[in-house]
Image (tube, rainbow, N blue to C red):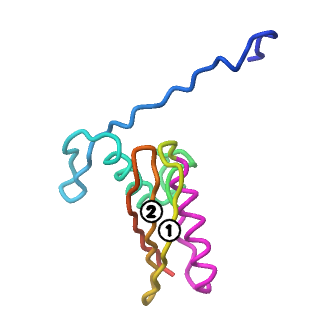
Amino acid sequence: MIPITGQDISNTVEVTQPSRTWLLDFERGRAATLVDNLDAVKQAVYKALQTERFAYLIYNADYGAELSGLTGKSSGIVESELRRRIRETLLQDDRISDVVNFAIAFGGDSATATFTVISIFGSIQGEVTANV
């Protein structure tokens, strides 16, 4: 659609979407109760990092993490790629403003990244493990 000339687009209002969602009980496979704000962000972080990007047709191409494909890479590349891929995954959520304070620990055939997620509701700690 072509905008009508002379219309002032600076008067547009950005609407914040609600963050209320069902809290999923992954052990029992059930939706337990409704959560909002920081608890909803915490679950969104967990879900996004546990979902392989492009693997499920139900999600669009922007959802999920690309944590595979790091096997056999040097520790420097793994560290750099994990930081980038985690940030790329989580910053898709408009409630998350930054991902900082990365620490990556290597053990055997895996690398565990811990980090701080800064959201509009506060900060939480995150952790994810990738095969390397």
- Going by the numbered disc 2, the residue's amino acid type is Thr
- Give left or right: position of 128 versus 12: left
Measure the C-alpha gap from mark 2 to mark 1. Answer: 6 Å
**Residue 3 is covered by the magenta coloring:** no
Q: Quadrant of residue 85?
A: bottom right
- The mark found on residue 58 in the picture is none
Q: Tell me, yes or no, whether the two marked residues, 2 and 1, touch with CB atoms within 8 Å.
A: yes
- Give left or right: position of 78 versus 36: right
Of the image marks 2 and 1, the number of the one nearer the N terminus: 1
Q: In x, y percent, where is residue 99?
A: 52, 59
- The mark found on residue 116 in the picture is 2
Q: Nearer the viewer, residue 104 or 119?
A: 119
- Going by the numbered disc 1, the residue's amino acid type is Asn
Q: In x, y percent, where is residue 124?
A: 38, 58
Mark 1 — residue?
Answer: 101
Q: In x, y percent, where is residue 84?
A: 60, 65
Q: Quadrant of residue 74?
A: bottom right
Q: Which residue shows up at 48% across the image and 30% down it?
A: 16
Q: Quadrant of the N terminus?
A: top right
Q: Judging from the image, what secondary structure is the residue with disc 2 in?
A: strand
Q: Residues within 10 Å of mark 1 (few under 14, many from 20)?
A: few
Q: Which residue shows up at 34% across the image and 45% down it?
A: 40
Q: Residues within 10 Å of mark 2 (few under 14, many from 20)?
A: some
Span shown in magenta? 66-92
